[in-house]
Image (cartoon, grey):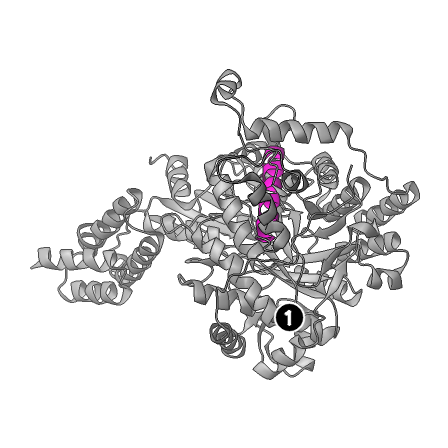
Amino acid sequence: MSKKIKSISDPKLKLEILTTEEVQKIHDATLWIIEHVGVRFPSKRALEIWEVNGANVDHEKKIVRAKPQLIEDALKKCPPKYILAARDPQQDCSLDGNHVYLGTDGCGVEVIDIETGQKRTSCLRDVQEIARVADATEEVGFHWVPVSAQDMPVESRGLHEIKAIWENSTKHVQTESIYNAAEAKAAIEMAAIIAGGKDKLRERPVLSLMQCTAPPLGHDGGSLDAALLAAEAGIPTGFMTMTACLTTGPATMAGTLAVGNAEVIAATALLQLAYPGAPVFYAAAQTASDPRSGAYTGGGPEDFLFGAATNVLSDFYNIPLSMGSFATGAKEPNWQAGLEGALSTFMASVVMSDMLLGCGFLHGSRIWSYAEMMMDCEIFSIIHKMMQGIVINDETLALETIANVGPGGHFLAQKHTRNHMRDIFLPQFLDRRPYSEWETKKDDARDWALAKARKILKEHQPDPLDEKISREFDRIIKSVEKQT
Amino acid sequence: MSEELYKEMAQSIIDGDSEKSVELAKKSIELQMHPLDTITKGFVVGVNYIGDQFGKGEAFLPELVMAGEAMKAAVATLEPELLKLGEARETMGRVVLATVEGDIHEIGKTLVGTMLSASGFEVTDLGVDQPAEKIIGKALEINADIIGMSALLTTTMVRQREVIEELDKEGLRPRIKVMVGGAPITKEWAEKIKADGTSEDAVGAVQLAKKLVGKE
């Protein structure tokens, strides 16, 4: 299997979704929110850090109000570039503003079983198997914990999950399911073992942490404590806002952008106040709630616009972005899934969001489907191809060949054609067969995608993790389980 | 005269105008109208209208929520009058709502609370991060028919089971019914922990609550 990771770089396409003045306006609104409304930080440590740095802290309500200067100065300390290191250095992801990487989506609770096709509760084995399939694809650049290992103890679940991924893939692991200090400490210890020590871990962070905010304008205490520990250890850390127009944000997109931005940059500033220069990223998956029911949609034009607008914000702060894409609300791989996957990923990619999260889910990031994962990967590949744009030069204009063929001939027998025919994108799952062939088989992308995932799962053996390391992991996990 | 006023009352609910609904409730007291009439012939008509429109997909969620709040404000104004008369507004049932211990994600639960209130249930919302003993204690205190629990995390949804086990241990079921909800909650999970039901959204939660109190 290829060790190569496919990433979008040197884009030829551009989109101007917000003007410089508009971004400044959102930023100013955000600072106003942080100064006058405040953001809730329900963590003793976080509140202490804010207080020491001169912010106004309401200890009873755990709300922090900070002057614009404090936030802006802190944000200037964020490093603009760094890597997400992989067990295999060839598979490092460079967060430098010129690469877009795809990850698996995360935190699902059910899986469409790859053999039976039945929906069931997710377990540790699913985490292992999805990691193994992701390891084999060139589109997946890094992992999130795709589904919850619900057969593992609650207090150490997040650790079993990252162990499962490291044992089944050499790619970078970003966990979004560790949100308390005890597990974060243990996870950092595990990452340090892979990196070869705590100092090496700073240079080669094989783990990164993503925490969800609690919109509107709040955070979870455990998440804050975990993020502070990660930042201290030099592990890339991001806060993700999932603010939704109508429910956890204003009905207007601009207001929802500002609310989410306040959550993210306030928490990012906190990490910089505590550990200046700590690698941080912006993470977002804003949406609009369905006006008829309030439901989480997982897609729609607002999501697509947020997908493009947020990178303009993270560029303004000069930090990498992890952007929600794919994650359709469709219940099975269908028209809606294709539409939402393609548009969300295109909009997030065309502005060069550094990380896309991610492939594989149905029903608003709840149900994992291997077929969906494979088809999402193909969507990413199509967008990867589109982002290269159209190359215009003497070779590609092919005047000599055009003259050779002349009016009325064909280009099939031309050397130039042979040299360039492989530039043309070759899909795996788009149906281009004669109608009669489809009529006899009545199969489609979903069948082929599932077959591909089955084949990978059967055949692909990732580079194993040293057994000694696995045993060390077991020891660390046990010690966390004993504590509780 | 009162016909006109009833219409205005219904309209204040439809408009989600709490100030207006309270003003009209006060006016009805001045005019010595019977508070139960005020509620059933006036305000409830508005709630039912919005409910119907919502069911048809014509009214949107914020309209429903605002109607619910206008209704709540009007009823609160009339409550002392009802007490004086020694009468109580008929309730669909009493519900205790909470987000379980360790979890702070409550928007869905809050929404369920609003919808239940608007549908005639008496709702006590304990908020977030609530341990089993608090939830059960409150349920006993107010003689609740239903406990509703939410969780957003797979690591906290196990707390729902703890509350149910505790209720069973105390022999409080089936007297107290339990409904569970939250993004990771499935029908299978609800069955596994022996909850009395679950719903994926607030509208379904109201239907479920009505079923659980035998008032479908």
Horizontal arrangement in the rendering, residue A128 relative to residue A420 (left or right): right
Label 1: element kind: loop
Depth check: give the residue in front, A468 or A457.
A457
Count of picture labels: 1
Taking the image as drawn, is residue B184 in sight? yes
Name the residue located 88 percent from the left edge and 64 percent from the top edge: A199
**Magenta segment boundaries in residue numbering:** A367-389
Mark 1 sits on what residue? A318
Q: Amino acid at mark 1?
A: Asn
- Toward which corner of the image does residue A255 lie, by quadrant? bottom left
Location of residue B177 with respect to A44 vertically, above or below: above
Taking the image as drawn, is residue A67 in sight? no
Depth check: give the residue in front, A29 or B67.
A29
Which chain is disc 1 placed on? A
- Toward which corner of the image does residue A425 lie, by quadrant? top right
> What is the crowding at mark 1: few (fewer than 14 residues within 10 Å), some, or many (at least 20)?
many
Q: Is residue A278 magenta?
A: no
Depth check: give the residue in front, A277 or B159.
A277
Question: Percent position (x, y) of residue A232?
Answer: 78, 67
Question: Which quarter of the rendered picture does the N terminus of chain A lie within?
Answer: top right
